[in-house]
Image: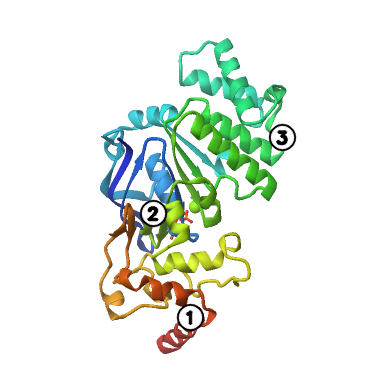
Amino acid sequence: MNLLEVRNLDIDYVTQEGTLKAISDVSFDLKQGESIGLVGESGCGKTTLAKSIMRLLPKNGVISKGEMLFKGEDIVKKSKEEVRKLRLKEIAMISQSAMNALNPVYTVGDQLIEGIRAHSNATKEEAAKRAEEVFKIIGLEAKRLKSYPHQMSGGMKQRAIIAMALTLNPSLIIADEPTTALDVVVQDKILNQIIEIQKQINSSMVFITHDISVVSEICETIIVMYGGKIMEKANTKVFFKAPYHPYSLGLQNAFPSIKEIGEELISIPGSPPNLMKEQNGCRFQERCPFRTELCQKELPELKEVGEEHLIACHYPEKVNEFREDAKKRETWEGVRNRLIEESVGEA
Ligand SMILES: Nc1ncnc2c1ncn2[C@@H]1O[C@H](COP(=O)(O)OP(=O)(O)O)[C@@H](O)[C@H]1O
Ligand SMILES: [Mg+2]
């Protein structure tokens, strides 16, 4: 059974300058125990999507269309109280901003115990025991429960946050760039712990990152987003062997750890689209080396190109050619030159 089914989701931000379409027609399923890596450049809507699942969008954020079925019930239609319960018992979020959620005047242990008791009918002793257990899983000594947040390093604090999120055996973990501000060694440790726990409690996970190499290590499924839309969804192993979408090909060039030795890093010229503007055609067309007139006019639908492998591109049959060309620097130089010409043309 699917734990989560997102269907045709649209999310807008209402601003003084107009409406920004942060998420457009996003649909995907998440199976029980499955982990999905959600990737894409900054501003493509990852955090918006994560927050909407928790119903924690800022005031000006509106789910204007679609549904999100969690265990068959639509999160979008739930009351505040129902959503609160869901957040406490079923869905846990681990994010960078959660670091600020630790209260400086209480020990981490007291906050953890308080949290456990607020969401269960555990006695103080039971909650304390659970807190110790979780600390152990996350690789912190039990005596650390007596520390105040300021007595802990960034890495320890982040682990404590993860511990808090996991005390309740959530069925869904949403991790939004949980290790971005930490150094690489700590990052690796924490990622491994998150995966270990996720497997132990068989929870599902949506793991958000701008670094696709992280996803290759920890997620079964990858979703590549661009400009508020899904460009590609695939089994991670399949994806890293044979990505389809030109944007995915571009992303792969830009990350060193998944490149073959000897290949050079090439970034994608240009920047993501302005989501305030009405979009015609493919969201990626401006920066795509392979665009045609059709791409500028008509939005490509997500279509299957293999088993559970979806892409939104008009030209899946040209993928071999695209893959070859995408490895060449001049292909992307061509995009850069086109962008320069276009901006001169506009001025
Ligand atoms: N509160 C807000 N009000 C207006 N626009 C917002 C708000 N939050 C995010 N956005 C815009 O929504 C888009 C998606 O942002 P976000 O979900 O944070 O992307 P990501 O997490 O992938 O970097 C961006 O264009 C961003 O500027
Ligand atoms: Mg974000």
Is tag 1's residue or tag 3's residue first in the polypeptide sequence?
3
| Closer to viewer: mark 1 or mark 3 | 1
In the rendered view, does 109 fall on the left or right side of 151? left
- SS at circle 2: strand
Q: Is 114 above or below relative to 277?
A: above
Question: What amino acid type is highlighted by mark number 3?
Answer: Met
Q: Quadrant of residue 30?
A: top left
Residue of label 1: 331
Q: Nearer the viewer, residue 276 or 163?
A: 163
Residue of label 2: 234
Q: Residue 109 placed where, x, y %?
A: 64, 23
Question: What amino acid type is highlighted by mark number 2?
Answer: Ala
Q: Marks 2 and 1, how far apart in space?
A: 25 Å
Name the residue at 59% across, 70% down. 265
Q: Residue 24 placed where, x, y %?
A: 31, 57
Q: Is 182 above or below relative to 108?
A: below
Residue of label 3: 152
